[in-house]
Image (cartoon, helix red, strand yellow):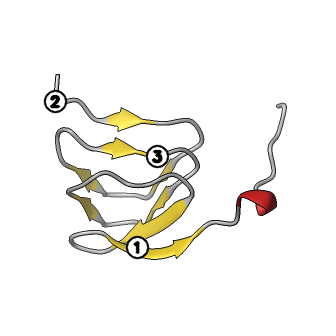
Amino acid sequence: QEDKVVLKEGCYIGAQCVILPGVTIGEYSIIAAGSVVNKDVEPYTLVGGVPTKLIRQIDKSKIIFSDK
């Protein structure tokens, strides 16, 4: 179904975000607080705004994985 929201592993969603139907949030991406997400978010990116825009790419080598 196209109207599902898909959250991939390790993504972070800021407070009071609106994610429209059919959007996929990529692995280890970050959505800034108060953003309106109207299209898919690529993995390893930081996005924000109304509507969201790319703020920066996230360096994969700097992600710290925890086994907790």
Residue 54 shows which numbered tag? 1
The image shows residue 51 at horizontal and vertical percentages of 21, 70
Residue named by callout 2: 2
Q: Amino acid at mark 1?
A: Leu
Q: Amino acid at mark 2?
A: Glu
Image quarter of the C terminus: top right
* Cβ atoms at labels 3 and 1 below 8 Å apart: no
The image shows residue 20 at horizontal and vertical percentages of 18, 47
User: From the viewer's perspective, is 22 left or right of 30?
Assistant: left
Viewer-proximal residue among 32 and 9: 9
* Cβ atoms at labels 2 and 1 below 8 Å apart: no
Residue drawn at x 15%, y 31% as measured from the top left: 3
Residue drawn at x 35%, y 34% as measured from the top left: 6
Say few, some or many: other residues with alpha carbon within 10 Å of mark 3 (under 14 / 14 to 19 / 20 or more).
many
Q: Is residue 4 above or below residue 61?
A: above
Specify which label sits upstream in the sequence, 3 or 1.
3
Q: CA distance from mark 3 to mark 2?
A: 16 Å
Q: CA distance from mark 2 to mark 1?
A: 23 Å
Q: CA distance from mark 3 to mark 1?
A: 13 Å
Q: Amino acid at mark 3?
A: Gly
Specify which label sits upstream in the sequence, 3 or 2.
2
Residue 26 shows which numbered tag? 3
Residue drawn at x 17%, y 40% as measured from the top left: 21
The image shows residue 16 at horizontal and vertical percentages of 31, 57
Specify which label sits upstream in the sequence, 2 or 1.
2
Viewer-proximal residue among 58 and 35: 58
